[in-house]
Amino acid sequence: MDIFKTDLGEITPMDNFGRDESFFRALIENSADAIALMSPEGLITYASPSTENVIGYTSEEFMGQNGFTLIHPDDLDAVQAALAPVLKTAGLSATFEYRFRQKNGEYRWLQGTATNLLHYPAVHAILGNFRDISKQKQSTDLLLASEEQARILLAREQEALRQAEVAQKHLNDLFVQAPALISILTGPEHRLALINDSFRWLYGNREFTLGKTVRENWPDLEGQGFFELLDRVYQTGVPYMGNEVLAMIDRAGTGILEPGYFNIVYQPANDARGKVSGIIVHAMEVTEQVLARQRIQNNEARLRRLIDANIVGVIFCDMEGHVNEANDVFLQMVGYTREDLQAGEIDWARMTPPEYTEVDLQALKALREKGAIPKPYEKAYYRKDGTLLSVVVTAAALDESNPNECVAFILDNSMQKELDQRKDDFISMASHELKTPVTSIKGFTQVLLKRFEKRDEPDIYRFLSIMDLQLNKLTKLIGDLLDISKAQDGKLTMEQKPFELDTLVAEIVEQMQATTATHNIKLEGKTNTTILGDRDRIGQVIVNLVTNAIKYSPRASTIVVRMLHREDQIAVVQVQDSGIGIDPIHHSKIFNQFYRVTNPDEPYPGLGIGLYLSRQIIERHAGKLWVESTKGEGSTFTFSLPIVPDVLP
Ligand code: ADP
């Protein structure tokens, strides 16, 4: 709103009013603008007739109203602010635009000029001059609106452009970086128009020459039928699609062709007239997938051959017992039919006698934890007819995705078991058969020894003594063999009587010392304990250990028999030698029947029975027998026995 000073001094309206009032009245009353006089408070004191044209009120109607009340509330503050200086200063004018309520209630835009004529006594009012500017306003509004529209359109266009650029870039990225191999060929000779990075990477970042033909760019593909396929697509317009197509390609540019498998699409591209003008090549390398599948197929074929070879029983089963698949060997072994299998009637858990449940549980634990059983184990199955079949079993979990499923290999062990049984029977029978004559020979030898004791026949007496000694060895051997048979049949009986361990150990050490001139047996420590058990059998164990200590330490002279009383109510006896020692791989095996560590350079006599029997005896007394040994450095055999404090003598 403009505020300006009017130089009223020169016009001197007072004079003009005075001179020719009708002239001014005519001027005012014919003016197109509405002219009004009002008090500083807004009260209209005069309104020209054209007021009606501008605001709808006749001059009579308008006079007496307060002009401010008709101003649009949104514009009132601005109008009053513009008027404030005018009201204060005589002769000051201000022009402003505002909305004014018409007689009909509608608002119309007016431009008003207010001039302070309060100091003119004849007027003493604010002179208001206002005109309707709605039309101008409307066109300005229209102009503004169209400007805004243009701005919006421009913004939209820019946004569309930006989006198009993004899409273009995206497309470009897709094309360039796509894992697929993409190229565009043009013309009947398939000249390279475009190629993406994947194609370059496939060939170890090799550069291709745009504009050159496929035959020039891909000499390695010559003679493999690809160019001919492109020719056909170009000529017929029919796309080509090939899955897992083998291509021999020179990946490294060394001239060596390597196999690669690709899923290929040759898509014809038409020109504006619908004629084929080029080909879009889209290919995906699937070599790894194809090779992986081939590997799986090969493995499957191998496994199938193994299963079908029917050398060994094979079953696919779950850990609960359900057998899903089995080969003929297994079915024959257990006497079931394929129909039984298909009907889900074969269940390895139900076929297992209860005494093997424990070993099975251990095997299942290993399967779950390690995916395989550490070594094959012996067990048995009930055949369909109820008879027992001895087997050796091993199994492995099939894969991690289905940890419950496994494959098991089953070997019929009945032949081996039968042989073992025959051997055991033979040992039992032979030892029994030998026992009687040997006892008899021993008896007669004793009689003869007595007879020749006092005769002067030293040679005969010496020979008889040697015979007696050898007969002792033979008797012990036969005794051991008999014990083995008994142990196998679970008939190894043990007495249950209290005895002092220290006395027993001391007695045996004394006896054994008398039989050896080469070794010194040192007795160390005391247990001060009473053991409840079989004194002779425990004695047999100590004899075995000391005998071995002497036998297996030919170049050492000292053997220590040590007794300890452990606080946890356990008595411990150790037999330590400085002999040939035992490699740790044999440590657990030497307690098996007939197991011997072979030593071709230095053969030691023996049958591999002593330690087996010793362990049986100690375990029957709820004790433990074990070895600590290093090859070449000697061995320490230790057994522990529980003490029975309340049976002290
Ligand atoms: P044998 O002595 O009759 O062969 P054992 O059962 O007593 O049978 O011992 C089994 C095997 O353990 C022996 O063949 C031997 O190889 C090994 N062995 C036992 N005691 C000792 C020892 N003190 N030092 C070295 N090796 C031993």
Image (cartoon, grey):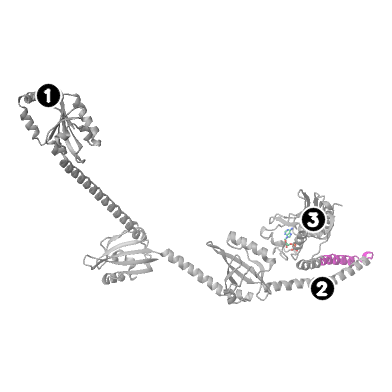
Measured along the vertical axis of the image, is residue 506 above or below residue 31? below
**Mark positioned earlier in the residue sequence (2 or 3):** 2
Q: Are marks 2 and 3 in contact (CB under 8 Å)?
A: no
Q: Which amino acid type is marked by label 2?
A: Glu
Label 2 residue SS: helix
The residue beneath circle 3 is 519
The residue beneath circle 2 is 433
Q: Marks 1 and 3, Cα distance to the nearest angstrom?
A: 159 Å
Label 1 residue SS: loop
Residue numbers of the magenta segment: 453-475
Q: Which amino acid type is marked by label 3?
A: His
Of 211 and 73, nearer the camera is: 73
Q: Is residue 298 left or right of residue 482?
A: left
Measured along the vertical axis of the image, is residue 243 above or below residue 80? below
Q: Residues within 10 Å of mark 2 (few under 14, many from 20)?
A: few
Of 241 and 544, nearer the camera is: 241
Q: Which mark is residue 457?
A: none
Residue 88 placement: quadrant = top left
Q: Marks 2 and 3, Cα distance to the nearest angstrom?
A: 35 Å
Cβ at disc 1 under 8 Å from ligand 1: no
Cβ at disc 2 under 8 Å from ligand 1: no
Q: Marks 1 and 2, Cα distance to the nearest angstrom?
A: 168 Å
Residue 625: give x, y in percent of width and height. Answer: 74, 57
- Which one is closest to the eye, mark 2 or mark 3? 2
Q: Is residue 596 magenta?
A: no
The residue beneath circle 1 is 122
Residue 617: give x, y in percent of width and height. Answer: 78, 61
Q: Is residue 278 visible?
A: yes
Of 372 and 191, nearer the camera is: 372
